[in-house]
Image (tube, rainbow, N blue to C red):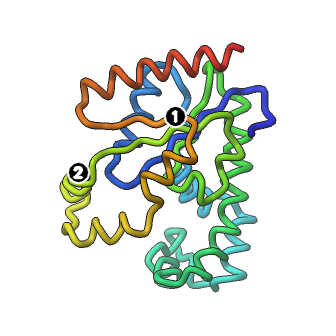
């Protein structure tokens, strides 16, 4: 639970679920949205303490003239849960602190923390309420294939490494099913009204 006076919503969902679309709709309705994945990538370049910590654990090769060597770092953690956990233990606290500072200066009625790994990273402790975005598997696969140019097998493999919809439903305060855009817009509008009410209590 967030200790801040600013009301915070955590939005999560598996690949291809429409999580980013929901966040964009909430932003259009006036919410401030924090993209944790984008900010993590930025912080790994901009935050000097974070850079030093990554270099200490993973080596000088992590950074080049153009900044973070993503391919090198990805190769270090690929398929190794223990090494990935070490990287996350360095990066997640920096993202958490960055989100807290960002949230406090926002003028919106409530703020949104968008994270594909909201529960895995413990970010649910930074928010007051959570929203899981879900969609049928066939739709998730189709969207991700179109977006990323990936094969069906590649998408299914990525999905298999993510939290299941059943688990997300169990952990989240709210859930929303993304079937069609017109339905989604209506559902998000209702959630926005609810979040505004909760923020004003």
Q: How far apart are marks 2 and 1 (CA)?
A: 23 Å
Report the label total: 2
Name the one closer to the observer, 29 or 39: 29
**Which residue, as the protein is rendered here, is positioned at the far right?**
3
> Residue 174: which disc?
1
Residue occupying image coordinates x 31% and y 37%: 178
Q: In this view, does 146 lie above or below 172?
A: below
Where residue 16 appears, as percent x and y from the top left, is 32, 51
Q: Give whichever of discs 2 and 1 has the lower sequence position.
A: 2
Name the one closer to the observer, 10 or 42: 10
Helix, strand or loop at mark 2: helix
Nearest to viewer (mark 2 / mark 1):
1
Residue occupying image coordinates x 52% and y 37%: 131
Left or right relative to 2: residue 10: left
Where residue 110 appears, as percent x and y from the top left, is 62, 24
Residue carrying label 2 = 143
Helix, strand or loop at mark 1: strand
The image quadrant where one finds the C terminus is top right
The image quadrant where one finds the N terminus is top right
Where residue 196 appears, as percent x and y from the top left, is 58, 17
* Cβ atoms under marks 2 and 1 closer than 8 Å: no
Left or right relative to 94: residue 148: left
Task: Determine crowd level at label 1: few under 14, some 14-19, many 20+ residues with C-alpha closer than 10 A.
Answer: some
Residue 90, image quadrant: bottom right
Residue occupying image coordinates x 41% and y 25%: 188
């Amino acid at each position: 639970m967030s200790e801040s006076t600013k009301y915070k919503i955590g939005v999560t969902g598996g690949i291809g679920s429409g999580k980013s679309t929901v966040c964009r709709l909430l932003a259009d309705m006036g919410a401030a949205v924090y993209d944790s994945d984008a900010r993590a990538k930025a912080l790994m370049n901009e935050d000097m303490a974070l850079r030093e910590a990554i270099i200490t654990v993973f080596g000088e090769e992590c950074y080049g003239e153009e900044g973070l060597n993503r391919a090198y770092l990805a190769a270090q953690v690929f398929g190794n849960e223990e090494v990935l956990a070490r990287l996350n233990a360095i990066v997640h606290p920096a993202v958490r602190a960055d989100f807290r500072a960002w949230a406090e200066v926002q003028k919106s009625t409530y703020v949104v923390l968008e994270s594909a790994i909201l529960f895995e990273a413990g970010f649910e402790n930074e928010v007051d309420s959570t929203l899981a975005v879900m969609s049928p598997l066939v739709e998730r696969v189709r969207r991700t294939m179109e977006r990323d140019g990936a094969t069906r097998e590649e998408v299914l493999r990525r999905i298999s490494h993510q939290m299941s919809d059943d688990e997300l439903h169990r952990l989240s305060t709210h859930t929303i099913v993304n079937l069609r855009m017109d339905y989604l817009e209506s559902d998000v509008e209702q959630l926005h009204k609810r979040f505004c009410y909760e923020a004003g209590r």
